[in-house]
Image (spheres, rainbow, N blue to C red):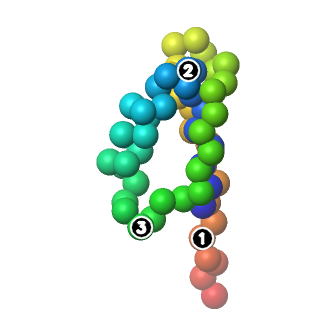
């Protein structure tokens, strides 16, 4: 699994990281990139894109 987190301002990084640490189980953290970006809606503070794969059942 990998996650890309887009923040309206990098000043929100510490707050986002705090929420992330509460949300993601210890030992199961995916690869992650966090970047500052102009988001699609000026009211948004964060956008998250996640990519995951699961094994197919035989």
N-term mark: 2 or 1: 2
Residue 16, by quadrant, is top left
The residue drawn where x is 66% and y is 24% is: 37
Cα separation between marks 1 and 3: 18 Å
N-term mark: 1 or 3: 3
Residue 28 position in % (x across, y down): 45, 65
Q: Secondary structure at mark 2?
A: loop
Work out which residue is located at the far left of the displayed protein and give it.
Answer: 22
The residue drawn where x is 41% and y is 67% is: 27
Residue at mark 3: 27
Q: Secondary structure at mark 1?
A: loop
- Asked whether, in this view, residue 6 is left or right of residue 20, the answer is right
Look at discs 2 and 1 and give the one toward the viewer: 2
Residue at mark 2: 9
Residue 11 position in % (x across, y down): 49, 22
From this view, report whether residue 17 is shown above or below residue 36. below
As drawn, the label of residue 30 is: none
Q: Residues within 10 Å of mark 1 (few under 14, many from 20)?
A: few
Q: Residues within 10 Å of mark 3 (few under 14, many from 20)?
A: few
Task: For the N terminus, give its image quadrant.
Answer: bottom right
Cα separation between marks 2 and 1: 33 Å
Q: Is the residue under label 3 in contact with that under label 2 (CB below 8 Å)?
A: no
From this view, report whether residue 21 is shown above or below residue 16. below
Residue 33 position in % (x across, y down): 62, 45
N-term mark: 2 or 3: 2
The residue drawn where x is 39% and y is 31% is: 15
Q: Secondary structure at mark 3?
A: loop
Residue at mark 1: 54
- Asked whether, in this view, residue 22 is left or right of residue 56, the answer is left
């Amino acid at each position: 699994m990998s996650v890309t987190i887009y923040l309206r301002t990098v000043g929100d990084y510490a707050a986002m990281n705090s929420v992330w640490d509460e949300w993601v189980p210890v030992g199961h953290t995916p690869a992650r990139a966090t970047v500052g970006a102009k988001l699609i809606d000026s009211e948004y503070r964060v956008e998250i894109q996640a990519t995951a794969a699961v094994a197919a059942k035989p």
